[in-house]
Structures are given as structure tokens and as C-alpha cells.
Image: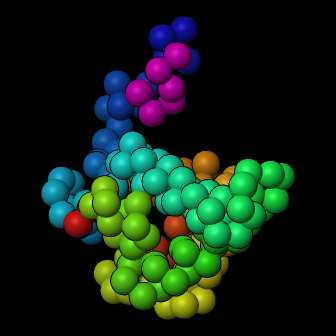
Amino acid sequence: MGSWLSGPREALERAGVDFGYRGESLGLPEHGPGSIARPGRRIGALVVDWALCLLIAYGLVTHGYNQATGNWALLIFFVLGVLTVGTVGCTPGKRLLGLRVVSEAGGRLGIGRVVLRTLLLSVAIPALIWDRDGRGLHDRLAKSVEVRI
């Protein structure tokens, strides 16, 4: 019962399997700048970005809250993500919380991979499926990593 509640990773670790730390397989440090961003910061950055997009849709596009505000906010979220991650490597929410999106190889992402990543993030389901390094499916498919700066 205990291994079922704590999950399969905990049971395997008790059996002696060494998974290493998050990002070890990618050659990233365990802590500090360049390490994989923790889920709390990533979710916080997403909330800040979504709130900013809702505010823009509310104030500039729909001039009040109605059913179309959420649709406009999603479109603004997509455009914001493509423009900011494609140029400076982070959205306003990521910058505020000290995060950056980089390629697995360590450089900037190309525009095609930025569009793919942002499109999958807008759908939301791929972002909820994580690997053992804590990267979402949208990051794995775009060959990107969200790291601390």
C-alpha cells in the first residue's frame, strides 16, 4: 500500500535504483543557474502570463468581460509566447520568476520550434505530461528546456 501511495519512483528508489537528479541526462547542473526549472516556478510564470493576456484582451480587445475574452486571451498568449520566446528566450512571467527557454543543445530555439512549443502549450494537455526530468511533452517535442537564470 505504501509504494502505491508514494508512486513507482519511490518504490524503485527504495529498491536501489538511482535515477539521478532532474536534468542530469541533459548535462545540466543540479542547482543554480542553468538547472531545470521547478514546477512551482513554471506554473507561476504561466499564471502571470495568462493574467497579462487576459488583462490585454479585457482592456484592449473586448472592452469588458464577455465570452470572447478567453478566446482573445488565448490568441494573445500564443502571439506573446512566439514573439518573446523567439526573440529573448522568455515571456514576461518567465523573466519575472527567473526562467528562460533554451534548446537542449544550449542555444536559442529556432522559430519553428518556438511555434511548435507555444502551440502545444496553448493546447495545455502536452504540458501536463512530464518526463522524469520534469520537462513537459511540449518541451520534449520542441527539443527545449526551461532553465533557471
Check the image and report above or below for 122 versus 37.
Answer: below
Displayed quadrant of residue 54: bottom right
Q: Which residue is drawn at 52% across and 60% down?
A: 52
Q: In screen coordinates, is 12 left or right of 74?
A: left
**Residue at image coords 38%, 63%:** 94
Q: Give the range drawn in magenta.
A: 5-10
Residue that sits furthest to the front in the current view: 63
Question: Where is residue 64, by image quadrant?
Answer: bottom right
Q: Residue at x 16, y 57 (%)?
A: 32
Instruction: Please determine whether, in this image, residue 72 is positioned above or below residue 12.
Output: below
Among all residues in the image, which is located at the extreme right?
Answer: 67
Q: Which color mode does the image show?
A: rainbow
Please, which residue is most extreme toward the left here? 32
What predominant SS class does the magenta segment belong to?
helix
At 52% from the left and 83% from the top, the residue drawn is: 83
Q: Is residue 105 visible?
A: no
Q: Where is residue 66 in the image (x, y as percent from the top left)?
A: 80, 51
Q: Where is residue 69 in the image (x, y as percent from the top left)?
A: 74, 58
Question: Quick check: 85 above or below 126?
Answer: below
Q: Is residue 18 magenta?
A: no
